Amino acid sequence: MFKSIRLRLTFYFSLIMIFILLGINYLLYQNSYVNKISNLDGSLHVVMNDMINEIQETMINNNIPELQEDIDEINEKFTSLASLRVIYYDLLTHSQTLIAHSFSDKRFVFKKFNFKKDNLPYEIAYEVVNNYRKATKIFQLDDKRLFLVQASMLISLEEENSLTFMSVNFIILFFSVMGFYFLISKTLLSVHNVVMSVNNIEAYDYTRRVNNTNLPTEIKELVDTFNKLLVRHEESFSKISQFSSDASHELKTPLTSIRGELEVGLRRERDLQEYQNILKKSLSKIIEIQDLIDGLLFLAKTDKLEMQSSFEEIYFDEIISECVEDLKVLANKKNISINISLLPLTVKGNYQLLKIAGINLLKNAIIYSDKEKEIEIKIEENNFEFIIFLQDQGLGISKEDLDSIFTRFYRVNKIKSKVNAGTGLGLSIVKTILDIHGFEISIDSKNHKGTLVKIFIKKEI
């Protein structure tokens, strides 16, 4: 019906106000009507008693003319009277005669009364007949004479008061609707401002946010939700941009190396051994490219909220044991022993992600450790948190490198790392996984003395 929320709410408010005013008017009318009936009953009660007194005084001597005069006086005294009548009934002859009457309002007509068939009310009986209040009573003067006394008054509510009341209702309705329209317009102004702010956000410009200050609670919740959506879009767009930039930059070197090896191999005929060496180097570079792409894809597609929604209770100490078991062959090649001292540790998290982080950290410790060294892994706890320690006796990391250790593609010990080629994404992936879980990581290291990795897991309160 109305597409505009403002008009729709105003329309509904108007209907509600109309029903409320109709209800109030009905209640006031009923109250006024009841009060009017009560007042009329009081007046009719006085009229009926006056008439009975007059009958007692005049009809002892059968002075009917005087009774008529008395009725006329009563009629003049009570200006609201519509009609009066007195019917005489002879108990001996069973005849009835209208002996006195007065009709100020000719619209009211008394119905015929049959003393034999109709009920005889010896107490004043009241009823409403065609918007008139009528009182009826049977009065017995003696053994021979019975009198029916009736009087009526018009039930009239003041028309002027009704018109005034209707005018007041219309004024109340008008100003209520106008006031509501003004208030709803002022309230929806904040919605308009939010819409304008949203329209000002250009495509792919996810850095801007809609201001949520001084907004109603309901609209503020909507704005906060929209801002959260922008944050997620910004993160996704940033990951896509980062992936494109990283891939185009980091893939150049291995691809150039592969191309160079193949071009050299095709310049002249070579023996089988030379071709195998070229293919081995190319395969090594292809594996490096594959690892690089896998790491970039992991960082690009990792969504914090989506990952957290799949968290479940897992045993972190068992994950560490599995990582040690999986890398035992690699450690044995360098004759490195891994010592573990673990406490039971249950956390809420993603099993696969935490295992990836564990594999990366332990693999780094093995790769960058000298032969016949030891790696120690243990779990300790205090009142506030669990702490996982990973200590190796490897090459170590300089203070200058520690500040950039979690940066993508950053490689420490550059000379040595040429031998132990890596993508430079391992610790960046570890940091991303731990951030998703709300864990903290710190690395302390000294050149040629080894590296200590600490993971801090807060206890749930």
Image: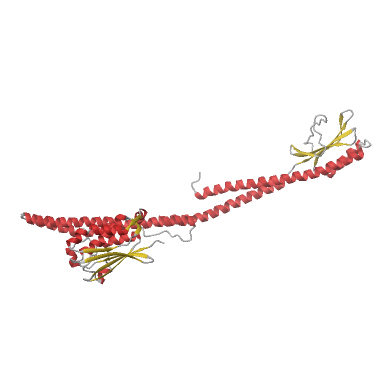
Classify residue 163 as left or right of residue 313: right
- Residue 400 rendering spot, x and y as whole percentages: 25, 71
Query: Residue 158: in sight, yes or no?
Result: no
- Residue 291 rendering spot, x and y as whole percentages: 22, 56
Above or below for 63 versus 460: above
Classify residue 99 as left or right of residue 236: right
- Residue 30 rendering spot, x and y as whole percentages: 69, 44
**Which sits in the foreground, 16 or 294?**
294
Q: Residue at x 23, y 56 (%)?
A: 293
Q: Quadrant of residue 233?
A: bottom left
- Residue 119 rendering spot, x and y as whole percentages: 80, 33
**Which sits in the foreground, 375 or 42?**
375
- Tally the numbered discs: 0
Q: Residue at x 81, y 34 (%)?
A: 120
**Which sits in the foreground, 69 or 389?**
389
**Which sits in the foreground, 207 or 254?**
254
Classify residue 260 as left or right of residue 194: left
Farthest-out residue, right: 61
